[in-house]
Image (cartoon, coloured by chain):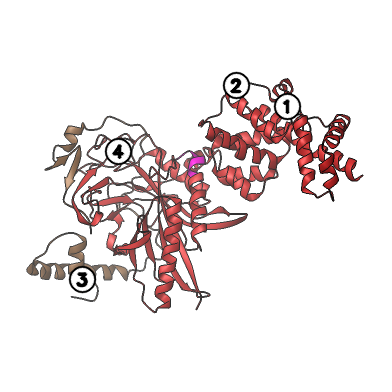
Chain colours: A red, B brown
Amino acid sequence: MSLKPTIGMETHVELDTESKMFCSCKVVETDEPNISLCPTCLGLPGALPVPNKKAIEYIVMLSLGANCSITKEGMFHRKNYFYPDLPKNYQISQFDFPVGVEGSLEIVIEDSLHTVAIERVHMEEDTGKSIHLGSGRIDSATSTLLDFNRSGVPLVEVVTKPIISSAKMAVAYIEELRQLVIDLGISKGKLEKGNLRFDANISVAEEGSDELGVKVEIKNMNSLKSLEKAIDYEILRQTKMVQDKESIIQETRHWDENKQVTLSMRTKEGSADYRYFSDPDLPNMVINEEFIEISQNQIKETPEKKRKTLLDTGLSLSDSNYLDKGQRWLYELYLSTVKETFDCKSTFNFLTGELQGQMRKAEISELPQWVNSEKLAGLINLFENNEVSFTSAKDILAKLLIEDIDPKSFASDNNLIQSSDNDEIKTLVTSVINENQDIVERLENPEDKLVGFLVGQVMKSSESKVNPGSVKEVLLKELFG
Amino acid sequence: MTKDFNIDDISNLASIHLEEKEKLKLQKDLEIVLEHVDALKNIDVKDEKIDIHPLSKVLELREDESTPSLSHEDAMKNSPETKDGHFVVPPSIE
């Protein structure tokens, strides 16, 4: 029996607003606990929530960016459950009428494009943070400490349809969604800060079957690496259970990063258990055409658009996707540099390989202001046209990162320009042949390794100022005719 | 117990402890509520516009501006126990 996995992703995106979702407390990023609180986000009786307009604009932008239809007349619901990090004992969320519905995101896996269907995009509020004291193990804590600074921070949940078929695809989807919220400017998108948090719903079913297997929800994956590992582990676990004729129970499991396994947390609540009902404090939310247009006009860039721009320069899909998901300055630098080099591949290789490598080595995260596309294009052209060796190009780049130089003038001032002048090369080659007669006599054919040795000797005598390709050509002609 | 609901599940979800006597009373009350809802379910509403909220007022949004919050001391005032600026509650693991 062949089994296929089906995965649906639920992702929470923390929006980057000045104030919280339903009150005017400042959104703070601090370790100092409980400093940005008011009766509303503390869930004190009688406090009334008033939604943040910017957060609604942001969720409309995200819904549009994920190609969703916008629900014009929506509302907020109360999702009821008891947990200390939720002081009201309900979370204001959306149920029947989410802001965005039926969208899709285009994602890239290696060198191919795929589509992930989005079921819904809805608005809610974040909870507080708990710290469990005791042995360090969450299930044997002696008491729990609560910090409500995060309580009420605007949160968007993006839910895909169950159509993701592998861990790799889930990772590519999260990368795309993360880039979308960054490009839209609506979230910092930092996984390590919890700006994006994801759960995976995983089931396995017989290949070809229309029905899905029993769904297990996996939580606590804090990085793309743990997402990939947790999904792979869970698919294996469920597959083995089905093959052993054991029944899978609908539950929530927790990814244990240390043990690299998923562990059962609790039996999953059905949505009826949350007793959703419309929040009487919040009347209907109307999102009219004008509001949608204002939100639409704020969308300057999406990863999909950026990728198309990159593809248009001639780059492959995977290289385009690499720059699309990388830092903004690198994307912009590539586009302005390739306009002057007209060589997408060598520009991509030089910027992502040499430039980034040297920046890492020099421990600089930002380019000095004098390093611009004109200078980099000049340098790329120098070695692409064989005017300087690749080694020299690397040296010039190292210099450029610490000093405002013109690559071409620097190369000529420092005798780095390679000669392709055949007469000069011929003179050097003749003298090397004369000096190495013993080796020349041992040469059997043009592929002989000793040819390389002789080329090296010519390079040495020229102090690397001649083009090695031209040297080999002249040398072979002299030796073998 | 009727087939429709289990009073223990409901008291559990609501985190309310009920004595046996209370359970019986609430069981009856909730059955009446369900019967009432069943009666509502029989009304033909297919030509009616969905009225999703009891109020006809439309939600007002506020600008994204922050205002001063409660002082840390005031925010913590009602808490029976605090530690290092946190609220302390009993262990909360299911």
| Label 1 residue SS | loop
The disc label shown at residue A361, or none: none
Residue A13 visible in the displayed image: no
In the rendered structure, the residue with mark 2 lies on which chain?
A: A
Identify the residue under disc 3: B6
The residue type indicated by label 4 comes to Cys
Of callouts 4 and 1, which one flags the residue occurring earlier in the amino acid sequence?
4
Identify the residue under disc 4: A23
- Please report the bounds of the magenta region as a residue range: A180-186
Disc 3 with disc 4 on a shared chain:
no
Label 2 to label 3: alpha-carbon separation? 77 Å
Identify the residue under disc 1: A416
Determine whether, in the image, residue A237 is placed left or right of residue A61: left
Label 2 to label 1: alpha-carbon separation? 17 Å
The residue type indicated by label 1 comes to Leu
Who's the residue at 55% across and 38% down the image? A300
The residue type indicated by label 2 comes to Glu
What percent of the width, then of the height, locates residue A423?
A: 89, 30
Label 3, residues with CA under 10 Å away: few <14, some 14-19, many ≥20: few
Label 3 to label 4: alpha-carbon separation? 38 Å
Label 1, residues with CA under 10 Å away: few <14, some 14-19, many ≥20: many
What percent of the width, then of the height, locates residue B1?
A: 18, 75
Identify the residue under disc 2: A403
The residue type indicated by label 3 comes to Asn
Q: Is residue A269 above or below residue A220?
A: below
